Image (cartoon, rainbow, N blue to C red):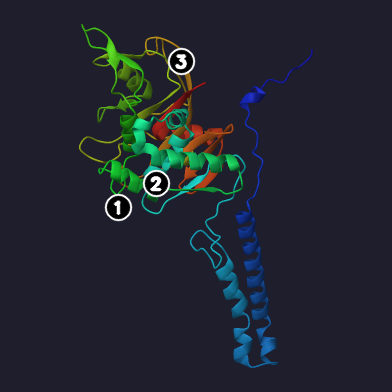
Amino acid sequence: MEIHAVGAPASLIPLAPERSLSKTTLKTHALVVLSYLLIGIGIALACASAYMATMMSPMLAMATPVAPIALGILLKPSKTSDGIFSTSKAPVYIKGQPLGIRNKRNDCWLNSALQVFFHSSSGKALMENLSVRNYSLFPLRSAFRRYQTELADESGRPTTSVNTAQLRIWLNKIAPKFSVNDSQEDPMDFFREIIKRTKTYLPLTEQLKGKKATPCNNAPFISLLSEYGKNKSFNALFDEFFHGAERRWFREAPKGFLVEAYRTAPDERQSKKERNGVDPIKGIQSGDPIEFPFNLELTESQCSKGPRRYSAGAFIIHHGAGTESGHYTAYVHRNGLWWHAKDHEVTQVSYGQAKIAIRDALVVHYAQN
């Protein structure tokens, strides 16, 4: 009897990316090699200092090994020191990766929002079809186009020239609620502001009990509002959005949409994520019942027209106790692979790691399959 191997279709198996080191990365590695060589020479001279003391003055014999060791330490790049040539903190570039975005302030909230916005189908469509009437958003569109140009260039640079400091100043000008100081903000407020100014609300229809169905033109995204102290699952909260006090449904299937999980206690900016263990990025499932799925299928009562199957394409994670503290990072799906963007650093993660991390997401962008 002939035996056939059974496995996932080839299209579902992610291929390892072609690794291409940038010139900056090669320079960094060369400095690391040189620094260790100098330190090694210094240690060898230190071992021979007793013999050298008989041939020269003792002080000179002791000082000779110090010079190469000190120079090697100064040259060696690290994550805490830029070294003489300022080539540290230059992440390794992997071909096809998203580009990291540098912060000059406490802007991780904006950084993660930009990563989701720049890589989601909804954000791309919004920027590409931006009307002249939305001239206040032109600085954001310029940053988007610059990011996309550098992304397509694949010159080996691991970070974009776009930075959050300039965009934070722009945000403060169009909406003073965004501080120009180092205060932590909510990334969802960024999405709310953009959607409000472009009026790109979800294509929903709503119907109050005993009333006629009318278009719902004020829902920027789907919010999972869990009553504090009641542990409701994602599915229960998601269904409540459509079948709550008023019934809602998509008139037609959107290309993509955001789903937000409100994970804070009332009148407090404190997280209600009660963990059973360590951070979910390390593989431990959290105790919060709001666990985002990777794949989402709308029912016929939730979407009356069009395709109903969606998959996660980008999401934001909040690390820390409250939304005004901690750290925000983003996960982005690009070129068939998942990437974790932590400010200017971008690393590739496995599908399994992303599937675990999405459970504790703050917001997820779902796109049509």
Question: Which percent across, then down, holds residue 2?
Answer: 79, 14
Q: Is residue 260 above or below residue 104?
A: above
Residue 249, by quadrant, is top left
Query: In front: 198, or 365?
Result: 198
Q: Earlier in the sequence, mark 2 or mark 1?
A: 2
- Whether residue 326 is visible, yes or no, is no
Inspect the image, locate mark 3, and give the three-letter code of the amino acid beneath it. Answer: Arg
Number of other residues with Cα within 10 Å of mark 3, as a class: few under 14, some 14 to 19, many 20 or more: some
List the residue tagged with mark 1. 181
List the residue tagged with mark 3. 308
In space, the residues marked 2 and 1 are separated at their CA atoms by 13 Å
Inspect the image, locate mark 2, and give the three-letter code of the amino acid beneath it. Answer: Cys
Inspect the image, locate mark 1, and give the three-letter code of the amino acid beneath it. Answer: Asn
Give the quadrant of the N terminus.
Answer: top right
- Whether residue 312 is visible, yes or no, is yes
**Which residue is at a point 41% across and 44% down the rendered structure image?**
111
**Which residue is at a point 20% across and 37% down the rendered structure image?**
267
Query: In front: 141, or 311?
Result: 141
Q: Secondary structure at mark 3?
A: loop
**Which residue is at a point 63% across and 71% down the rendered structure image?**
39
**Which residue is at a point 67% across and 41% down the rendered structure image?**
18
The numbered mark at residue 159 is none
Q: Nearer the viewer, mark 2 or mark 1?
A: 1
Number of other residues with Cα within 10 Å of mark 1, as a class: few under 14, some 14 to 19, many 20 or more: few
In space, the residues marked 2 and 3 are separated at their CA atoms by 33 Å
List the residue tagged with mark 2. 108
- Judge left or right: residue 349 versus residue 275: right
